[in-house]
Image (cartoon, grey):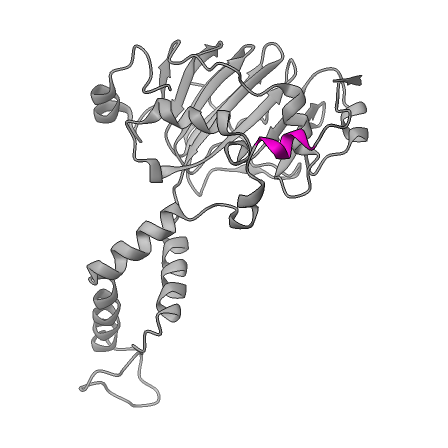
Amino acid sequence: MPSGLVNFDVERFLRDDWQRAPRFIAKGLDISNPITAEELAGLALEEPIESRIVTKNAQGWQSQDGPMSEHDFQHLPTSHWTLLVNAVDLWLPRVRKTYDYFDFLPSWRFDDIMVSYATKGGGVGPHFDLYDVFLVQIEGRRRWQIGQICDESTKLDTDGGLRIVQDFQAQAEFITEPGDVLYLPPCIAHWGEALSPSITYSVGLRSPSIAEMLADLSIELEALGDLRHYRDPIEADRSADIDISDTTIDEIQSTLSEVIADRALITDWFARYMTRPRYPDWLDETNERRVARTGRATYINGEPS
């Protein structure tokens, strides 16, 4: 069973790069028996599995959500398209073993492994993610350009169903070959383009927003029957036309702080929140039998597999 990356200084990475800067790791791992393009296409035919095809033409990038059909695959161009399938680790145990290479990070931080198959020139355009990701090159070669740090003010083109960074500014470039790993921290613009037909694993880490966590925590409190409600401070001015007072705000902050300060509550909630299955209703399907069940012909570039 694999454990850790090859030729990789974990302490240096966590000190200098983790959530700070991109890091290219040459020949960091060797995955045997990886998923094939045909298997990936078979998964994309399935109703519950999230997938999409991104094509590039003179007008830019266009995204089509799955599930796909054999007709979709038969009518694709010979180049400049990408098939992406989310959470492949839930369906194929051998893909899930990829997490073992990253055992220097807590297991509860990992979200899913998205797998992409790209023809020459394929990619999803310049974009950025709000989470950490390790891009593992499995087959073929890709050119990755690393751009600027992005935020909520970054101008995006969303016309094609994607979030394309309009003013992408390349600052570094890497060519990934089988076994290479490229780490990207959150909010770093990047642009990958296949130089040959290629397969890439995107190992993403859970990174919920504060708003998402607070929303889930509120559901937790309701489920526990928490009866704490807002109460006016004793010295509050109850005049109808007065602004919200500082005393009232102090009372609200104090009440909310009581919840956050409940360490046992937060510990129990957070542990379950961060380890909650992404697709709990699919657990009985997450094995190789699901793929075996897609035995019908699958087409890549018009050729039956």
Q: Is residue 82 visible?
A: no
Q: Could you tell me which residue is drawn at 25 percent across and 54 percent down?
A: 267
In the image, taking residue 118 as reference, residue 74 lies left or right, namely right
207 is higher (above) or lower (below) than 25: below
Q: Residue at x 39, y 55 (%)?
A: 211
Residue 217 seen anywhere in this rendered image of the structure: yes
- Kindly indicate the quadrant of the structure image that contains residue 29: top left
Residue 63, image x and y in percent?
A: 67, 34
Q: Main secondary structure of the magenta part?
A: helix
Callout count: 0
Q: Residue at x 75, y 24 (%)?
A: 298
Between 80 and 25, the residue placed more toward the observer is 25
**Would you say 107 lies left or right of 144 here?**
left
Image spot of residue 292 (x, y percent): 66, 29
Relative to 71, 156 lies left or right: left
7 or 30: which is nearer to us? Answer: 30
Q: Nearer the viewer, residue 172 or 241?
A: 172
Answer whether residue 291 is magenta in the image.
yes
Which residues are drawn in magenta? Answer: 288-293
Tell me where residue 154 appears, x and y as whole percent.
47, 38
Residue furthest to the bottom in view is 239
Residue sticking out furthest to the front: 289
Q: Is residue 276 above or below residue 160?
A: below
Which image quarter holds the N terminus?
Answer: top left
Residue 196 picture quarter: top right
Pick the residue in front: 78 or 87: 87
Q: Quadrant of the C terminus?
A: top right
Q: Is residue 111 magenta?
A: no
| Residue occupying image coordinates x 62% and y 39% | 49
| Quadrant of the rendered image containing residue 198 | top right
